[in-house]
Image (cartoon, coloured by chain):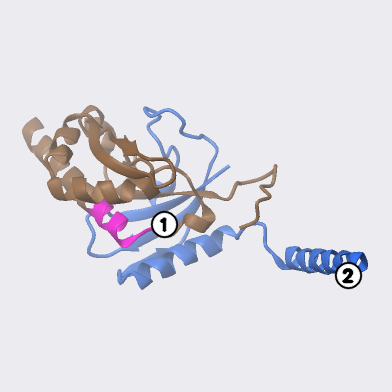
Amino acid sequence: MSEFVPLYGALPYYQTHFVISGNGRAFENQLIARTMKKTKGIIKKQVIDAWWEGGSIADRLNQDANLRALLLEILLEEANIYIDPNDNGIRIYSDWKPEYKIEISKKALEAYNIIAGHVKNHLSELTVSRK
Amino acid sequence: MLMDSNLKSLFVGAICLLNMEGEKDYLETEDVRKLFFEHLKSLGKDAELIDIGKLDIEKKPYYSFYFSGRSRMVDNVGCIKVKGQNFDHIHLLRLG
């Protein structure tokens, strides 16, 4: 990609949302969450700790050791991961990426899949408990 | 000797200009959707391209705006369905 960024129109930055259909607003306080991380180094930067903050879904995600191990590997490329319940679905996404970095790694895709699984299970549990 | 170095720098400059003419500033949105789709296929995922504007999730707003720094100027690029995953769709968005 060229270093030149045009001053008009859409910018060459993209975001990939992993969407779970349904009304996320019904349980938005429980489902909203984001990752926090602790890094070490400047040139050879690495993530030494990662955890979730937010609603009750954050406690569930923090208990998953497999997911935490994946997060330590992918959070350098993905920056942060957010769970954002919305009117037309629950969206899991990372920060904006330039178009030459649009491709996602296999481990990142696996992590998003695990997070989506936790969100789905948590959502069904919340729906049952409300009834 | 001085003449030689000047000629060399001129030659390098001309090559740079030629390269710039053929270079795209950024890709078209359709290309990025297909690019990501092909990438998913290369990862061994059973993916399917969905036409733009067919799903409810493509309607705004895309964010709850509880997190700071979420842009309101966002373009819909399109959706991809990946079979055998916990999430239902992958939705690509473009800034601006």
Left or right of A116: which side holds B79? Answer: right
Q: Is residue A84 visible?
A: no
Q: CA distance from mark 2 to mark 1?
A: 55 Å
Taking the spot 37% from the left edge, 46% from the top edge, the residue there is A76
Quarter holding the N terminus of chain A? bottom right
Quarter holding the C terminus of chain A? top left
Report the chain holding disc 1: B
Left or right of B48: which side holds B23? Answer: right
What amino acid type is highlighted by mark number 1?
Cys
The image's mark for residue A69 is none
| Mark 1, secondary structure of its residue | strand
- Chain in blue in the render: B
**Residue bearing the label numbered 2:** B4
Q: Quadrant of residue B66?
A: top left
* Colour for chain A in the figure: brown
Check the image and report above or below for A51 versus B46. Answer: above
What amino acid type is highlighted by mark number 2?
Asp
Nearest-to-viewer mark from 2 and 1: 2
Q: Position of residue A57 (x, y in %)?
A: 18, 35
Q: Nearer the viewer, residue B20 or B93?
A: B20
Question: Quick one: label 2 or label 1, which is nearer the N terminus?
Answer: 2
Range of the magenta residues? A104-113
Q: Position of residue A93 (x, y in %)?
A: 36, 45
